[in-house]
Image (cartoon, rainbow, N blue to C red):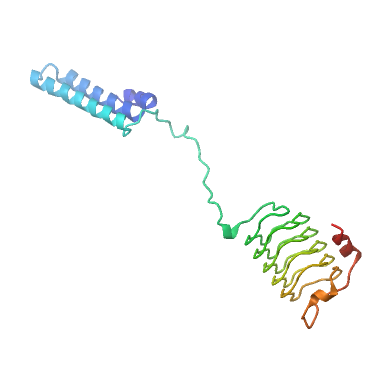
Amino acid sequence: MLVVTAAASRSSGPFGVVTATVVALGAIVLAIGGATFQRTTKIAVAATTTIMIGLAFVGWQTGVLPDEPVQGVAATPSRKPTIPAPSASVIRPEHPTAGADLRGAVLDGQHLAGASLKGVHASGASMVGAVLDGANLAGADLRGAQLAGVRLPGASLRGANLAGANLSDAVLADACLIGADITGADLTRANFTGAVVDPRAIGDLTEPPLGWNTPSGAGRAACAK
């Protein structure tokens, strides 16, 4: 009987298993007791078998007993785990491009050296410790962005809006900031050595940051991007 049910499971799934089992049990009972059972008992066994087969058929019709073949464990295809998509507040674009909408995005520690991010909309974004050596951020909207410890040597920030941004400990050596708005930005310990800047952009700061207004050839080259 085990051989029969196994074969039925491979060909007709759970429906085949139940049907084959009922038929096999009915046949076994009649074969063993056929010589001694009274006629009424034989009729009862046959009727029970028929009813069980009918119930199995109803189960198949309603989908309770599907007829799809049952596969072995080894044949079951593996499924890759589903990785939930990050929420909008923790977007981490792998390859942001010029003009991209990065408002509120989290790019902390990412290596984007030489990236073309011209005109990106990144107000309120977080790029703490990001590596943006030689990147083009001309005209970028970085208002209120978290840029603490960011590396921007040789980067172009021409015309960028950095108002209220946190640039503490940022490295902007040899960068271009011509026309950049740094109103209210935190420039604590920021390094502007060799950067090309508008001397008047320092605003109300009583003490200019390190290297302020010491333009270099590399800084001028950054302005040509």
**Image quadrant in which the C terminus is located:** bottom right
The image shows residue 40 at horizontal and vertical percentages of 8, 21
Q: Which quadrant holds residue 183?
A: bottom right
Horizontal side, residue 43 vs residue 9: left or right: left
Judge whether 76 appears above or below 206 on screen: above
Front in this rendered view, residue 41 or 92: 92
Q: Decide if residue 187 is in sight here.
A: yes
Horizontal side, residue 182 vs residue 32: left or right: right
Q: Which quadrant holds residue 163?
A: bottom right
The image shows residue 107 at horizontal and vertical percentages of 66, 60
Q: Tell me the residue at 17%/21% (across/down).
A: 46
Q: Which quadrant holds residue 142?
A: bottom right
Q: Tell me the residue at 69%/51% (across/down).
A: 95
The image shows residue 204 at horizontal and vertical percentages of 77, 81
Q: Decide if residue 209 is in sight here.
A: no
Front in this rendered view, residue 91 or 183: 183
